Amino acid sequence: MKRTSLVQTQFLSAQDVATIVVEVGVEATLSRMADFIFEDYLRWQDFDKCARVASHSTDGVIELMPIADAKTYAFKYVNGHPKNTLAGLPTVMAFGVLADVATGIPELLSELTLTTALRTAAMSAVAARALARPGSRSMALIGNGAQSEFQALAFHHLLGIQEIRLFDTDPEATQKLMQNLQHTSLRLIDCDSIAQAVRGADIVTTVTADKTNATILTPDLIEPGMHINGVGGDCPGKTELHADVLRMASVFVQYEPQTRIEGDLQQLPADFAVTELWQVLRQEAPGRTSAQEVTVFDSVGFALEDYSALRYMRDAASELGLGQLVSLIPDLPNPKDLFSLIAPKAQVASHKLALAA
Amino acid sequence: MKRTSLVQTQFLSAQDVATIVVEVGVEATLSRMADFIFEDYLRWQDFDKCARVASHSTDGVIELMPIADAKTYAFKYVNGHPKNTLAGLPTVMAFGVLADVATGIPELLSELTLTTALRTAAMSAVAARALARPGSRSMALIGNGAQSEFQALAFHHLLGIQEIRLFDTDPEATQKLMQNLQHTSLRLIDCDSIAQAVRGADIVTTVTADKTNATILTPDLIEPGMHINGVGGDCPGKTELHADVLRMASVFVQYEPQTRIEGDLQQLPADFAVTELWQVLRQEAPGRTSAQEVTVFDSVGFALEDYSALRYMRDAASELGLGQLVSLIPDLPNPKDLFSLIAPKAQVASHKLALAA
């Protein structure tokens, strides 16, 4: 008798997710992903949260980022190895899972390398919509690596940024970005220094990769009213902002316990006041209060964004008919009879089944 | 120009792992896996360890179990949902990953449901070889569910157990076990009560699934010299042994910080003395010291066993030519150009590549 498998895992490969983004369009993908993130942040209290679990080594870090509400559990595996590019490898690689809380079944296994770049940019835009000056039109983009185009497009499409002032210590990275975005209506300006890029910008996005306590932004560069979207300071010993930049600003974070460990905030004492973004999005705490205020979104990447992004990718894959089922969990006619998998007759039967399929 | 992919993930499905066990043989698989576990426990200090990260819900738990040495990072996803069997689903489902610490590349993605049953049994045998009375021949096996046959075979092949006295609240589970193991040389005895199963046994294995503070074993059942292999008490609120059973015994654990939270040990104060098993295996601490001593291995399942088991499965799959490559991480000609994945021309090129393949 043919029975339907009760335990199935849908697999979305890197190519599947790339196809989703191309089919849906990168603008619409960023916009919908931002909506998913916004919706999930509004119900912040529904989630069982923890700081991510990091395993540090000489040249990098590997992290697990779990989160769950009453219905769905999500986690992401992600590394950060800045020296990888020297060997032709990505700095950040990721994948993740959505699972059913009621049964524990891992229902979706998906690439998250491309998705992480998209969700990080969408998250930055969600924060900036609440924190940047209304009518912001220019952005400095410091760090023009793997994530930079996604940040540029998210701010272009979701905030109305028209001009982006670029700087990277690697001029080829900047050239790559300019080429990738040449057919958009963004005005892209290749700058010779961080100071030149930042001068006069409404928003400053830092998205550099070095695992070091860097000072990409110092207080002298900061102008009244700027919004700083600090993306690359996201690991102990990996910061981008001079501590005094934080001191002169109102600082907003995703999940305070994690940002205290990982964010630029790691440089400041535990009693330095910050506001969790969900409170601003729910209008339970003020965001920007004046046109002169300097705001900082000390972004580190929180599991909730991956939950939202996985949720989005699952829906999109289902609509487009993408992905394939993989046998991650054995399918057992009798769940108490795991041993049946390795009983000789079961092997014969499953071989026949495989041949018949 | 054709280039070789730098980032590849090997996938072992549930069927692949079942095939490995059938090809190698369950006895040899358990024996080699026990060797791998033993080797890794001898170099305990090489590992970056933490208690697993658990997400509890009404009917179950989902856990992430990471561990790493200087070269290899491993983690397991595993759930525990005792009521799943009512819906025809396994109580425990798992999968895991081996990754390269130097680069963060997830090199192996494998099923771990079947593998967990094997490695738990192999771990129990490694502990019992150090803790049970030499010459032990009979074992009580309380709980005859999904993991029970593996425990029976591990103790049969690796310790020389000849007689197993069975009890389960579900008589069908016991019948299933007796049928699955009918062609072995084990003497299997179906008992009417826990007391009947335990009486006179050299070793008592408890491997029940209920998420409750149960007292499968009470002090009156314990005889001098018994070794208790407590497998099912592995979660806050999920215990099998009466606290006084622990008090009358020498208690051995895998990783003390985790067992204090999850093991039967959770019932006792923080200063109740226990010994970590690696110390016994390295002969740096005594194991059993007399024929009259009662020993307890308060097993909860530690990430190191999964590291060992994944390592074993990777080697075995390689020898047998099993598994397939999956596109979990995108392959990028220029690692800083993640955006190339969704540039229209890249899509066309990769479509052509897919068609040509």
Image: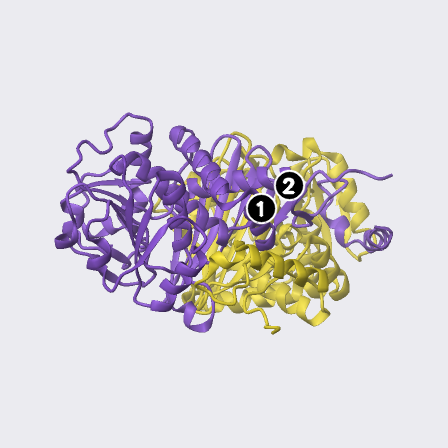
Chain colours: A purple, B yellow
The residue under the point 15% across, 47% down is: A223
Q: Would you place residue A212 above or below residue B116 in this image?
A: below
Query: Toward the viewer: A114 or B89?
Result: A114
Gap in angstroms between the C-alphas marked 1 and 2: 8 Å
Q: Could you say where residue A240 lies in the image, as x and y percent from the top left?
A: 25, 56
Q: Position of residue A282 (x, y in %)?
A: 33, 27
Asked which quadrant contains residue A337, the reply is top right
B155 to A136, vertically: above or below: below
Where the N terminus of chain A falls, by quadrant? top right
Dot placed on the residue nearer the N-terminal end, 1 or 2: 1
Q: Mark yes or no: residue A192 visible.
A: yes
- Between A138 and A307, the residue placed more toward the observer is A138
Q: Identify the residue at horizontal 34%, vertical 48% (top origin).
A: A300
Which residue is under mark 1? A20
Q: Is residue B244 visible?
A: no
| Mark 1 surroundings: few (<14), some (14-19) or many (≥20) residues within 10 A | many
Q: Position of residue A48 (x, y in %)?
A: 42, 35
Q: Is label 1 in a helix, a strand or a loop?
A: helix
The kind of residue on which mark 1 rests is Ile
On the picture, is B69 further left or further right than B26? left
Is B290 displayed left or right of B84 in the figure? left
Element assignment for label 2: helix
Pointer 2 chain: A
Which residue corresponds to mark 2? A320
